[in-house]
Amino acid sequence: DAGVTQSPTHLIKTRGQHVTLRCSPISGHKSVSWYQQVLGQGPQFIFQYYEKEERGRGNFPDRFSARQFPNYSSELNVNALLLGDSALYLCASSSGQGSETQYFGPGTRLLVL
Amino acid sequence: GEDVEQSLFLSVREGDSSVINCTYTDSSSTYLYWYKQEPGAGLQLLTYIFSNMDMKQDQRLTVLLNKKDKHLSLRIADTQTGDSAIYFCAERDTGRRALTFGSGTRLQVQP
C-alpha cells in the first residue's frame, strides 16, 4: 500500500512569491495535518483537515492557508514568502477517528531566497 | 501551553542499549509517540503508548511512561548503526488534534 505522498520534493522560491504544496493521504484516511519543521527543531503544527473541514489551526500567520479535496488530498498554500518560511513541510495522514495516529510523508523542502 | 523537552544528543556503542528521555508538561496528554527521522527524510512512527499504560514493548523497543513525573523514555536494545537518527517525542491530548513535538534527540551509534 502506498504511504503518504507529497509533491514536490524540493522547491526554491524567492521572497514575496507564493507556493502550493500537495499531499495525498494513505488510502482510507480522511484526515490530513500539515507541519513545518525548521532545521534543528521539531515539527510545528500548522493545520488539520478532516472531511474537507478545518479541524485545527496552529499559531501561523494568515499567509498560510490550506484546503482538502473530496478525494481527501490536500494543498498547503503560503503567500508572500519570507526567508523564515524556509523549512521542511510535512504532511501527516490519519483515519480521523479513534487513536488518530498520524503517519508522515517524506516532506517538501522549501528554500526561500 | 504544552511543552515537550528532550536532551539533544546521545552517543552509544553498537550492541549497547540506548535510552532516550522526554518530559512533557500537559497533564491531559492522552497519547505519547516516538518518531524516528533519518537525514533528509520524513518522520517514521516507531511506537506509541496510551496514557493509562506504564510500559509497552515492541521487539527491540521498550517505552516506559511515568505519568506522575510526566516522563517518557524509549529504550532500544542491541543498538545498531542503522538506528543512528533523530528521535522525536510527541504528545497529544483528546481535546486537540495536533501533535506537540520535542526538539529531538540525535542518536549516534559508534561501531
Image: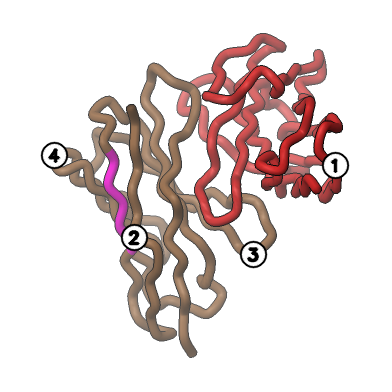
Q: Relative to B82, say whether B67 is above or below.
A: above
4 or 1: mark nearer the eye: 1
User: Residue under circle 3?
Assistant: B39
How many discs mark residues in the rendered view?
Answer: 4
**Residue in the image at 24% along x and 33% along y:** B52
User: Residue under circle 1?
Assistant: A14
- Do circles 2 and 1 both sit on a common chain? no
For badge 1, the amino acid type reads: Thr
| Marks 3 and 2, the one that precedes in the sequence | 2
What is the chain letter for disc 2?
B
- Do circles 3 and 2 both sit on a common chain? yes
Give the alpha-carbon distance from disc 2 to disc 1, as whole Å. Answer: 35 Å
| Marks 4 and 3, the one that precedes in the sequence | 3
Chain A on-screen colour: red
Give the alpha-carbon distance from disc 4 to disc 3, as whole Å. Answer: 34 Å
Residue B19 position within the rendered picture, expressed as x and y whole percent measured from the top left = 31, 66
Residue B22 lies within the magenta run: yes
Q: Residues within 10 Å of mark 3 (few under 14, many from 20)?
A: few
Q: Which mark is residue B68?
A: 4
Tell me if residue A1 can be seen.
no
What is the chain letter for disc 4?
B
Q: Which chain is brown?
A: B
User: Residue under circle 2?
Assistant: B7
Of residues B39 and A65, which is closer to you in this image? A65
Q: Quadrant of the N terminus of chain A?
A: top right
Give the alpha-carbon distance from disc 2 to disc 4, as whole Å. Answer: 20 Å
Residue B68 position within the rendered picture, expressed as x and y whole percent measured from the top left = 13, 39
Asked if disc 3 and disc 2 are in contact, CB closer than 8 Å, the reply is no
- In this picture, which residue range is highlighted in magenta? B20-24
